[in-house]
Image: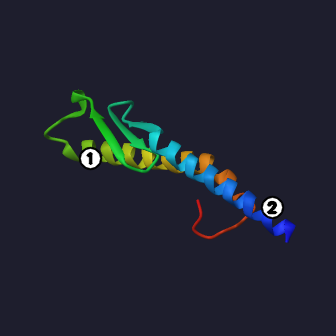
């Protein structure tokens, strides 16, 4: 019984640490660019796109497809970076557990 009590305390501590890490992720941002910095996307640790910056030099009314591709590429790269950030921050809680669907 004593071991069970210790295990419960450890689980509660881990849960508090996970909650704190999740809260910290809300404050973190990542930035990704495409086209040599012509398009920049900033995303939060919650996978929300916070800002998109487009250099006016890349805006060509005759080539909208290129601009769309740059925005898409920068957005996808930002989301990859968020996944990496989440794995870095939250992965320590699930190492060795092999729980499907967890980070």
Of labels 1 and 2, the one closer to you: 2
Tell me the SS state at disc 2: helix
The residue where tag 1 is placed is 68
**Residue 47 against residue 51 in the figure, above or below:** below
Q: Position of residue 64 (x, y in %)?
A: 19, 44
Near mark 1 (Cα within 10 A), the count class, few <14, some 14-19 or many ≥20, is few
Give the quarter of the image for residue 66: top left
**Which residue is at 42% across, 43% downward?**
44
Q: Is residue 72 left or right of residue 1?
A: left
**Which residue is at 79% across, 65% downward?**
5
Q: Which mark is residue 98?
A: none
Can see residue 84?
no
**Which residue is at 75% across, 61% downward?**
96
Q: Is residue 53 left or right of residue 11?
A: left
Whole-angstrom CA distance, mark 1 to mark 2, is 55 Å
The residue where tag 2 is placed is 6
Q: Position of residue 59 (x, y in %)?
A: 20, 34
Q: Which residue is outermost to the left?
A: 61
Viewer-side residue, 40 vs 4: 4
Q: Quadrant of the N terminus?
A: bottom right
Q: Are marks 1 and 2 in contact (CB under 8 Å)?
A: no
Q: Position of residue 28 (x, y in %)?
A: 48, 39
Q: Quadrant of the C terminus?
A: bottom right
**Residue 46 against residue 42 in the figure, above or below:** below
Near mark 2 (Cα within 10 A), the count class, few <14, some 14-19 or many ≥20, is few
Give the quarter of the image for residue 98: bottom right
Q: Position of residue 51 (x, y in %)?
A: 31, 38
Viewer-side residue, 9 vs 59: 9
Can see residue 101?
yes
**Residue 55 against residue 87 in the figure, above or below:** above
């Amino acid at each position: 019984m004593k071991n069970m009590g210790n295990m419960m305390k450890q689980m509660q501590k881990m849960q508090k640490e996970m909650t704190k890490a999740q809260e910290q992720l809300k404050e973190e941002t990542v930035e990704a660019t495409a086209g040599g910095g012509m398009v920049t996307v900033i995303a939060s640790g919650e996978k929300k796109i916070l800002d998109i910056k487009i250099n006016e030099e890349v805006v060509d009314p005759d080539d909208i497809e290129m601009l769309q591709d740059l925005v898409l590429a920068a957005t996808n790269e930002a989301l990859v970076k968020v996944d990496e950030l989440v794995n870095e921050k939250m992965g320590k809680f699930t190492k060795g557990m092999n729980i499907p669907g967890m980070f």
